[in-house]
Image: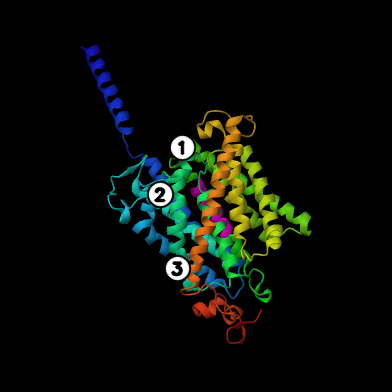
Amino acid sequence: MKKLGFLFVLVFFLMMVTSSMAWAGEGAIDTGDNAWILASAALVLLMTPGLCLFYGGICSVKNIVNMLMMVFITIAIISVQWILWGYSLSFADGNWMIGGLSKVGLMGITPDSVSGTIPEYTFMIFQCMFAVITPALVLGAVEGRMKFGAALLFVPLFATAVYNPICHWQWGGGWMGNFGVLDFAGGLVVHVCCGAGALTLAVMLGPRKRENVKPPCNLPAVLCGTGLLWFGWFGFNGGSQLAADGNAALAFTVTNEAAATATFVWMVCEYFHKGKPTLLGALTGAIAGLATITPASGFVGPLGAIQIGIMAGVGCYFAVEKLKPAFGYDDALDVVGVHAIGGTIGTFAAGLYATQLATGKDGAYGFFIGWDMAGLGQLGIQCVGIAATWAYTVAVCIIIGLVIKYTIGLRTTEEQEDTGLDITQHGEMGYHLELETVGTLKR
Protein backbone atom coordinates (compact mmCIF):
# COMPACT_ATOMS: atom_id res chain seq x y z
CA MET A 1 0.00 0.00 0.00
CA LYS A 2 2.83 2.39 0.80
CA LYS A 3 4.39 1.71 -2.61
CA LEU A 4 1.04 2.21 -4.31
CA GLY A 5 0.50 5.47 -2.45
CA PHE A 6 3.98 6.66 -3.38
CA LEU A 7 3.34 5.86 -7.07
CA PHE A 8 0.01 7.70 -6.92
CA VAL A 9 1.65 10.82 -5.46
CA LEU A 10 4.46 10.63 -8.05
CA VAL A 11 2.04 10.31 -10.97
CA PHE A 12 -0.10 13.18 -9.62
CA PHE A 13 3.00 15.38 -9.25
CA LEU A 14 4.16 14.60 -12.80
CA MET A 15 0.69 15.39 -14.16
CA MET A 16 0.67 18.74 -12.37
CA VAL A 17 4.14 19.65 -13.66
CA THR A 18 3.29 18.61 -17.19
CA SER A 19 0.02 20.52 -17.22
CA SER A 20 1.65 23.63 -15.77
CA MET A 21 4.39 23.46 -18.43
CA ALA A 22 1.79 23.13 -21.15
CA TRP A 23 -0.17 26.07 -19.72
CA ALA A 24 3.03 28.15 -19.56
CA GLY A 25 3.55 27.59 -23.27
CA GLU A 26 0.10 28.92 -24.11
CA GLY A 27 0.74 32.65 -23.82
CA ALA A 28 1.23 32.69 -20.05
CA ILE A 29 2.70 35.80 -18.45
CA ASP A 30 6.19 35.38 -17.04
CA THR A 31 6.34 37.62 -13.98
CA GLY A 32 10.11 37.93 -14.18
CA ASP A 33 9.98 39.07 -17.81
CA ASN A 34 7.13 41.43 -17.00
CA ALA A 35 8.98 43.03 -14.09
CA TRP A 36 12.14 43.52 -16.17
CA ILE A 37 10.35 45.11 -19.15
CA LEU A 38 8.34 47.45 -16.89
CA ALA A 39 11.60 48.49 -15.21
CA SER A 40 13.18 48.92 -18.64
CA ALA A 41 10.31 51.15 -19.72
CA ALA A 42 10.97 53.36 -16.71
CA LEU A 43 14.69 53.43 -17.56
CA VAL A 44 13.96 54.50 -21.13
CA LEU A 45 11.56 57.20 -19.91
CA LEU A 46 14.36 58.55 -17.70
CA MET A 47 16.50 59.00 -20.81
CA THR A 48 14.38 61.92 -22.04
CA PRO A 49 14.96 64.07 -18.91
CA GLY A 50 18.57 62.93 -19.20
CA LEU A 51 18.56 64.23 -22.76
CA CYS A 52 17.21 67.53 -21.43
CA LEU A 53 20.31 67.91 -19.26
CA PHE A 54 22.64 66.72 -22.03
CA TYR A 55 21.24 69.05 -24.70
CA GLY A 56 20.46 71.91 -22.31
CA GLY A 57 23.99 71.98 -20.94
CA ILE A 58 25.50 72.21 -24.43
CA CYS A 59 23.19 75.07 -25.46
CA SER A 60 23.91 78.77 -25.25
CA VAL A 61 22.88 80.27 -21.92
CA LYS A 62 20.11 82.24 -23.67
CA ASN A 63 18.49 79.16 -25.24
CA ILE A 64 18.61 76.55 -22.48
CA VAL A 65 14.98 76.88 -21.36
CA ASN A 66 13.79 76.58 -24.95
CA MET A 67 15.77 73.37 -25.43
CA LEU A 68 14.58 71.90 -22.13
CA MET A 69 10.97 72.70 -23.07
CA MET A 70 11.19 71.26 -26.59
CA VAL A 71 12.69 67.98 -25.39
CA PHE A 72 10.58 67.53 -22.25
CA ILE A 73 7.27 68.30 -23.96
CA THR A 74 7.75 65.32 -26.29
CA ILE A 75 6.90 63.08 -23.32
CA ALA A 76 3.48 64.72 -23.07
CA ILE A 77 2.77 64.85 -26.81
CA ILE A 78 3.93 61.38 -27.81
CA SER A 79 2.48 59.62 -24.77
CA VAL A 80 -0.97 60.74 -25.95
CA GLN A 81 -0.28 60.23 -29.68
CA TRP A 82 0.98 56.70 -29.00
CA ILE A 83 -2.20 55.70 -27.17
CA LEU A 84 -4.57 57.30 -29.69
CA TRP A 85 -3.04 56.04 -32.95
CA GLY A 86 0.76 55.65 -32.80
CA TYR A 87 0.82 52.16 -31.28
CA SER A 88 -1.79 50.92 -33.73
CA LEU A 89 0.06 52.31 -36.76
CA SER A 90 3.25 50.68 -35.50
CA PHE A 91 2.12 47.27 -34.24
CA ALA A 92 -1.44 46.45 -35.29
CA ASP A 93 -1.93 44.07 -38.19
CA GLY A 94 -1.62 46.03 -41.41
CA ASN A 95 0.42 45.73 -44.57
CA TRP A 96 4.09 45.86 -45.50
CA MET A 97 4.17 49.64 -45.06
CA ILE A 98 2.02 50.60 -42.06
CA GLY A 99 0.00 49.03 -39.28
CA GLY A 100 -3.78 49.07 -39.27
CA LEU A 101 -6.29 50.91 -37.07
CA SER A 102 -7.57 47.95 -35.06
CA LYS A 103 -5.78 49.14 -31.91
CA VAL A 104 -6.60 52.85 -32.11
CA GLY A 105 -7.13 54.06 -28.56
CA LEU A 106 -5.81 50.64 -27.45
CA MET A 107 -9.14 49.07 -28.43
CA GLY A 108 -9.32 45.38 -27.67
CA ILE A 109 -6.36 45.40 -25.28
CA THR A 110 -7.12 44.27 -21.72
CA PRO A 111 -4.96 43.40 -18.70
CA ASP A 112 -5.27 39.78 -19.86
CA SER A 113 -3.91 40.51 -23.35
CA VAL A 114 -0.50 38.89 -23.82
CA SER A 115 2.40 39.70 -26.12
CA GLY A 116 4.92 36.87 -25.90
CA THR A 117 5.48 36.31 -22.19
CA ILE A 118 4.44 39.80 -21.02
CA PRO A 119 1.13 41.70 -20.92
CA GLU A 120 0.49 43.70 -24.07
CA TYR A 121 0.18 46.81 -21.91
CA THR A 122 3.79 46.24 -20.81
CA PHE A 123 4.96 45.85 -24.41
CA MET A 124 2.97 48.91 -25.44
CA ILE A 125 4.34 51.24 -22.76
CA PHE A 126 7.91 50.01 -23.31
CA GLN A 127 7.64 50.82 -27.01
CA CYS A 128 6.01 54.15 -26.17
CA MET A 129 9.22 55.33 -24.52
CA PHE A 130 11.16 54.68 -27.73
CA ALA A 131 8.61 56.74 -29.62
CA VAL A 132 9.02 59.57 -27.07
CA ILE A 133 12.77 59.99 -27.29
CA THR A 134 13.14 59.77 -31.08
CA PRO A 135 11.64 63.18 -32.01
CA ALA A 136 13.24 64.65 -28.88
CA LEU A 137 16.64 63.69 -30.29
CA VAL A 138 15.85 65.45 -33.58
CA LEU A 139 15.37 68.81 -31.86
CA GLY A 140 18.99 69.03 -30.74
CA ALA A 141 19.92 70.11 -34.27
CA VAL A 142 17.78 73.27 -34.28
CA GLU A 143 19.03 75.10 -31.19
CA GLY A 144 18.43 78.84 -31.20
CA ARG A 145 16.34 79.23 -34.35
CA MET A 146 13.16 77.11 -34.51
CA LYS A 147 9.82 78.49 -33.35
CA PHE A 148 8.50 76.67 -30.32
CA GLY A 149 5.09 76.37 -31.98
CA ALA A 150 6.76 74.81 -35.02
CA ALA A 151 8.46 72.27 -32.76
CA LEU A 152 5.12 71.41 -31.13
CA LEU A 153 3.66 70.72 -34.57
CA PHE A 154 6.71 68.88 -35.87
CA VAL A 155 6.79 66.31 -33.05
CA PRO A 156 3.42 64.57 -33.69
CA LEU A 157 3.76 64.89 -37.48
CA PHE A 158 7.21 63.29 -37.37
CA ALA A 159 6.01 60.53 -35.05
CA THR A 160 3.00 59.72 -37.24
CA ALA A 161 4.52 60.01 -40.71
CA VAL A 162 8.11 58.89 -40.03
CA TYR A 163 8.60 56.99 -36.78
CA ASN A 164 5.42 54.88 -36.81
CA PRO A 165 5.91 53.53 -40.36
CA ILE A 166 9.63 52.75 -39.86
CA CYS A 167 8.86 51.10 -36.51
CA HIS A 168 6.27 48.95 -38.29
CA TRP A 169 8.73 48.11 -41.06
CA GLN A 170 11.24 46.67 -38.60
CA TRP A 171 9.36 45.49 -35.51
CA GLY A 172 5.65 45.45 -36.36
CA GLY A 173 5.54 42.89 -39.17
CA GLY A 174 6.51 45.19 -42.04
CA TRP A 175 8.83 44.63 -44.96
CA MET A 176 12.19 45.43 -43.35
CA GLY A 177 11.93 42.87 -40.56
CA ASN A 178 10.60 40.27 -42.98
CA PHE A 179 13.45 41.05 -45.37
CA GLY A 180 15.89 40.09 -42.62
CA VAL A 181 17.33 43.46 -41.54
CA LEU A 182 18.93 43.20 -38.09
CA ASP A 183 18.07 46.05 -35.73
CA PHE A 184 17.91 44.84 -32.16
CA ALA A 185 17.01 48.05 -30.32
CA GLY A 186 16.70 50.92 -32.78
CA GLY A 187 19.76 51.74 -34.87
CA LEU A 188 17.48 52.42 -37.82
CA VAL A 189 14.15 52.93 -36.06
CA VAL A 190 15.52 55.48 -33.57
CA HIS A 191 19.01 56.73 -34.44
CA VAL A 192 19.13 56.90 -38.24
CA CYS A 193 15.52 58.06 -38.17
CA CYS A 194 16.20 60.95 -35.78
CA GLY A 195 19.56 61.81 -37.34
CA ALA A 196 18.21 62.00 -40.88
CA GLY A 197 15.31 64.12 -39.61
CA ALA A 198 17.75 66.40 -37.79
CA LEU A 199 19.84 66.88 -40.95
CA THR A 200 16.73 67.76 -42.95
CA LEU A 201 15.51 70.31 -40.40
CA ALA A 202 18.96 71.87 -40.01
CA VAL A 203 19.29 72.38 -43.77
CA MET A 204 15.76 73.76 -44.13
CA LEU A 205 16.21 76.19 -41.24
CA GLY A 206 19.63 77.36 -42.36
CA PRO A 207 22.62 78.19 -40.12
CA ARG A 208 22.75 80.47 -37.11
CA LYS A 209 24.67 83.72 -37.30
CA ARG A 210 28.25 83.24 -36.18
CA GLU A 211 27.79 85.53 -33.18
CA ASN A 212 24.89 83.38 -31.93
CA VAL A 213 27.01 80.22 -31.79
CA LYS A 214 28.06 80.14 -28.14
CA PRO A 215 30.03 77.67 -25.98
CA PRO A 216 28.18 75.20 -23.70
CA CYS A 217 26.54 76.93 -20.75
CA ASN A 218 26.79 74.09 -18.21
CA LEU A 219 29.21 71.18 -18.65
CA PRO A 220 28.33 69.60 -15.26
CA ALA A 221 24.73 69.30 -16.52
CA VAL A 222 26.02 67.61 -19.68
CA LEU A 223 27.90 65.12 -17.49
CA CYS A 224 24.76 64.40 -15.43
CA GLY A 225 22.71 64.01 -18.60
CA THR A 226 25.25 61.59 -20.05
CA GLY A 227 25.14 59.52 -16.87
CA LEU A 228 21.34 59.30 -17.00
CA LEU A 229 21.40 58.40 -20.69
CA TRP A 230 24.01 55.69 -20.13
CA PHE A 231 21.99 54.35 -17.19
CA GLY A 232 18.74 54.40 -19.16
CA TRP A 233 20.36 52.73 -22.15
CA PHE A 234 20.61 49.47 -20.22
CA GLY A 235 16.81 49.36 -20.34
CA PHE A 236 16.81 50.60 -23.93
CA ASN A 237 18.99 47.72 -25.18
CA GLY A 238 18.61 45.11 -22.45
CA GLY A 239 14.84 45.49 -22.41
CA SER A 240 14.60 45.02 -26.18
CA GLN A 241 15.08 41.29 -25.67
CA LEU A 242 11.57 41.44 -24.12
CA ALA A 243 12.62 38.80 -21.61
CA ALA A 244 14.78 38.52 -18.51
CA ASP A 245 17.19 35.99 -19.98
CA GLY A 246 20.79 35.50 -21.06
CA ASN A 247 20.45 37.51 -24.25
CA ALA A 248 19.20 40.48 -22.22
CA ALA A 249 22.33 40.14 -20.10
CA LEU A 250 24.42 40.02 -23.29
CA ALA A 251 22.80 43.22 -24.58
CA PHE A 252 23.34 44.85 -21.18
CA THR A 253 27.02 43.88 -21.19
CA VAL A 254 27.92 44.91 -24.75
CA THR A 255 26.12 48.23 -24.30
CA ASN A 256 28.48 49.13 -21.49
CA GLU A 257 31.57 47.89 -23.35
CA ALA A 258 30.86 49.84 -26.53
CA ALA A 259 30.11 53.05 -24.63
CA ALA A 260 33.26 52.77 -22.53
CA THR A 261 35.42 52.06 -25.57
CA ALA A 262 33.99 54.93 -27.62
CA THR A 263 34.48 57.35 -24.73
CA PHE A 264 38.19 56.60 -24.58
CA VAL A 265 38.66 56.46 -28.37
CA TRP A 266 36.94 59.85 -28.87
CA MET A 267 39.23 61.34 -26.23
CA VAL A 268 42.30 59.93 -27.99
CA CYS A 269 41.12 61.23 -31.37
CA GLU A 270 40.58 64.67 -29.89
CA TYR A 271 43.99 64.65 -28.26
CA PHE A 272 45.82 63.87 -31.50
CA HIS A 273 43.61 66.19 -33.56
CA LYS A 274 43.41 69.22 -31.26
CA GLY A 275 46.13 68.66 -28.71
CA LYS A 276 43.84 68.53 -25.66
CA PRO A 277 41.10 66.11 -24.62
CA THR A 278 37.89 67.78 -23.46
CA LEU A 279 35.13 66.71 -21.11
CA LEU A 280 32.48 67.53 -23.74
CA GLY A 281 34.33 65.35 -26.23
CA ALA A 282 34.49 62.36 -23.89
CA LEU A 283 30.78 62.70 -23.05
CA THR A 284 29.87 62.96 -26.74
CA GLY A 285 31.96 59.85 -27.40
CA ALA A 286 29.99 57.93 -24.76
CA ILE A 287 26.68 58.80 -26.46
CA ALA A 288 28.17 57.89 -29.85
CA GLY A 289 29.16 54.47 -28.50
CA LEU A 290 25.70 53.91 -27.03
CA ALA A 291 23.96 54.89 -30.26
CA THR A 292 26.26 52.75 -32.39
CA ILE A 293 25.92 49.54 -30.35
CA THR A 294 22.12 49.82 -30.20
CA PRO A 295 21.23 47.93 -33.42
CA ALA A 296 23.81 45.22 -32.74
CA SER A 297 23.42 44.90 -28.97
CA GLY A 298 21.58 41.57 -29.01
CA PHE A 299 23.61 40.10 -31.85
CA VAL A 300 27.30 40.57 -30.96
CA GLY A 301 29.67 39.43 -28.27
CA PRO A 302 31.91 41.54 -26.01
CA LEU A 303 34.87 41.55 -28.44
CA GLY A 304 32.62 42.66 -31.27
CA ALA A 305 31.21 45.39 -28.99
CA ILE A 306 34.69 46.74 -28.28
CA GLN A 307 35.39 46.94 -32.00
CA ILE A 308 32.05 48.66 -32.59
CA GLY A 309 33.03 51.14 -29.86
CA ILE A 310 36.25 51.87 -31.74
CA MET A 311 34.28 52.37 -34.94
CA ALA A 312 31.90 54.71 -33.11
CA GLY A 313 34.68 56.79 -31.57
CA VAL A 314 36.56 57.24 -34.83
CA GLY A 315 33.61 57.40 -37.25
CA CYS A 316 31.40 59.77 -35.26
CA TYR A 317 34.35 62.01 -34.37
CA PHE A 318 35.20 62.29 -38.07
CA ALA A 319 31.57 63.09 -38.89
CA VAL A 320 31.40 65.86 -36.27
CA GLU A 321 34.79 67.42 -36.95
CA LYS A 322 35.13 66.95 -40.72
CA LEU A 323 31.85 66.10 -42.44
CA LYS A 324 29.81 68.86 -40.80
CA PRO A 325 32.22 71.68 -41.73
CA ALA A 326 32.71 70.22 -45.21
CA PHE A 327 28.98 70.22 -46.01
CA GLY A 328 28.17 73.36 -44.02
CA TYR A 329 24.98 72.29 -42.28
CA ASP A 330 24.40 73.78 -38.83
CA ASP A 331 23.63 70.75 -36.68
CA ALA A 332 23.88 72.60 -33.37
CA LEU A 333 24.24 69.65 -30.99
CA ASP A 334 25.69 67.08 -33.44
CA VAL A 335 22.64 64.87 -33.78
CA VAL A 336 23.70 63.90 -37.29
CA GLY A 337 27.30 63.05 -36.46
CA VAL A 338 26.44 61.07 -33.32
CA HIS A 339 23.07 59.46 -34.03
CA ALA A 340 22.70 59.26 -37.81
CA ILE A 341 26.30 58.22 -38.43
CA GLY A 342 26.44 56.09 -35.27
CA GLY A 343 23.18 54.34 -36.16
CA THR A 344 24.41 53.75 -39.71
CA ILE A 345 27.75 52.33 -38.57
CA GLY A 346 26.06 50.18 -35.93
CA THR A 347 23.45 48.78 -38.31
CA PHE A 348 26.18 47.82 -40.77
CA ALA A 349 28.24 46.35 -37.91
CA ALA A 350 25.27 44.26 -36.79
CA GLY A 351 25.69 42.33 -40.03
CA LEU A 352 29.47 42.41 -39.81
CA TYR A 353 29.82 41.00 -36.30
CA ALA A 354 26.54 39.17 -35.66
CA THR A 355 26.92 35.60 -34.49
CA GLN A 356 24.99 32.58 -35.66
CA LEU A 357 24.09 31.84 -32.05
CA ALA A 358 22.52 35.28 -31.57
CA THR A 359 20.64 35.48 -34.88
CA GLY A 360 19.58 31.86 -35.23
CA LYS A 361 20.35 31.98 -38.96
CA ASP A 362 22.08 29.32 -40.99
CA GLY A 363 25.72 29.95 -41.77
CA ALA A 364 28.34 31.60 -39.63
CA TYR A 365 29.23 35.21 -40.10
CA GLY A 366 30.93 37.69 -37.88
CA PHE A 367 34.14 38.38 -36.02
CA PHE A 368 36.19 35.30 -35.04
CA ILE A 369 33.66 33.02 -36.72
CA GLY A 370 34.61 33.21 -40.38
CA TRP A 371 33.08 34.63 -43.50
CA ASP A 372 30.81 32.89 -45.95
CA MET A 373 28.08 33.92 -48.38
CA ALA A 374 25.53 34.22 -45.57
CA GLY A 375 27.68 36.90 -43.99
CA LEU A 376 28.08 38.84 -47.22
CA GLY A 377 24.37 38.53 -47.90
CA GLN A 378 23.51 39.91 -44.48
CA LEU A 379 25.68 42.97 -45.10
CA GLY A 380 23.72 43.59 -48.30
CA ILE A 381 20.45 43.28 -46.40
CA GLN A 382 21.71 45.76 -43.78
CA CYS A 383 22.63 48.26 -46.51
CA VAL A 384 19.12 48.05 -47.99
CA GLY A 385 17.63 48.86 -44.59
CA ILE A 386 20.03 51.78 -44.08
CA ALA A 387 19.33 53.27 -47.50
CA ALA A 388 15.56 52.90 -47.17
CA THR A 389 15.46 54.52 -43.72
CA TRP A 390 17.63 57.47 -44.81
CA ALA A 391 15.68 58.08 -48.02
CA TYR A 392 12.21 57.78 -46.50
CA THR A 393 13.01 59.95 -43.46
CA VAL A 394 14.57 62.76 -45.48
CA ALA A 395 11.77 62.78 -48.05
CA VAL A 396 8.94 62.85 -45.50
CA CYS A 397 10.70 65.40 -43.26
CA ILE A 398 11.06 67.74 -46.24
CA ILE A 399 7.29 67.56 -46.72
CA ILE A 400 6.64 68.12 -43.00
CA GLY A 401 9.06 71.04 -42.94
CA LEU A 402 7.42 72.67 -45.96
CA VAL A 403 3.94 72.27 -44.47
CA ILE A 404 5.05 73.97 -41.25
CA LYS A 405 7.04 76.65 -43.08
CA TYR A 406 4.09 77.75 -45.20
CA THR A 407 1.52 77.60 -42.40
CA ILE A 408 2.90 78.87 -39.09
CA GLY A 409 6.54 79.29 -40.12
CA LEU A 410 9.64 77.32 -39.12
CA ARG A 411 12.22 79.89 -38.09
CA THR A 412 12.13 82.69 -35.55
CA THR A 413 13.03 86.25 -36.47
CA GLU A 414 16.61 87.48 -36.47
CA GLU A 415 15.85 89.78 -33.55
CA GLN A 416 14.43 86.89 -31.51
CA GLU A 417 17.50 84.78 -32.21
CA ASP A 418 19.83 87.58 -31.16
CA THR A 419 17.91 88.12 -27.93
CA GLY A 420 17.57 84.41 -27.23
CA LEU A 421 14.64 82.03 -27.40
CA ASP A 422 14.31 81.71 -23.63
CA ILE A 423 13.00 85.24 -23.30
CA THR A 424 11.30 85.63 -26.68
CA GLN A 425 9.56 82.23 -26.75
CA HIS A 426 8.99 81.54 -23.05
CA GLY A 427 9.50 84.75 -21.09
CA GLU A 428 11.95 83.22 -18.65
CA MET A 429 15.64 82.46 -18.26
CA GLY A 430 17.51 79.36 -17.20
CA TYR A 431 20.03 81.39 -15.25
CA HIS A 432 19.28 84.77 -13.65
CA LEU A 433 22.46 86.63 -14.47
CA GLU A 434 23.08 90.36 -14.44
CA LEU A 435 21.44 92.10 -17.39
CA GLU A 436 23.08 94.85 -19.43
CA THR A 437 19.83 95.64 -21.22
CA VAL A 438 16.41 94.03 -21.21
CA GLY A 439 16.61 90.63 -22.87
CA THR A 440 20.39 90.64 -23.33
CA LEU A 441 22.48 88.45 -21.05
CA LYS A 442 25.82 89.73 -19.83
CA ARG A 443 28.30 86.93 -20.45
Determine if residue 376 is in view. yes
- From the viewer's perspective, is 72 left or right of 195? left
Q: Is mark 1 on a helix, strand or loop?
A: loop
Asked if marks 2 and 1 touch (Cβ < 8 Å), the reply is no
Q: What element carries label 3?
A: helix
Marks 1 and 3, the one that precedes in the sequence: 3
Hey, which residue is sitting farthest bottom in the picture? Answer: 437
The residue labelled by disc 1 is: 245
- From the viewer's perspective, is 394 left or right of 315? left
Q: How far apart are marks 1 and 3 (CA)?
A: 40 Å
- The boundaries of the magenta stretch are 225-237
Q: Which of 230 and 316 is in front in this view?
A: 316
Indicate whether 297 appears above or below 371.
below
The residue labelled by disc 2 is: 38
Q: Does the magenta stretch include residue 221?
A: no
Residue 279: x %, y % from top left: 68, 60
Q: Quadrant of residue 105?
A: bottom left
Q: Distance between the residues labelled 2 and 1?
A: 15 Å
Indicate whether 30 appears above or below 432.
above
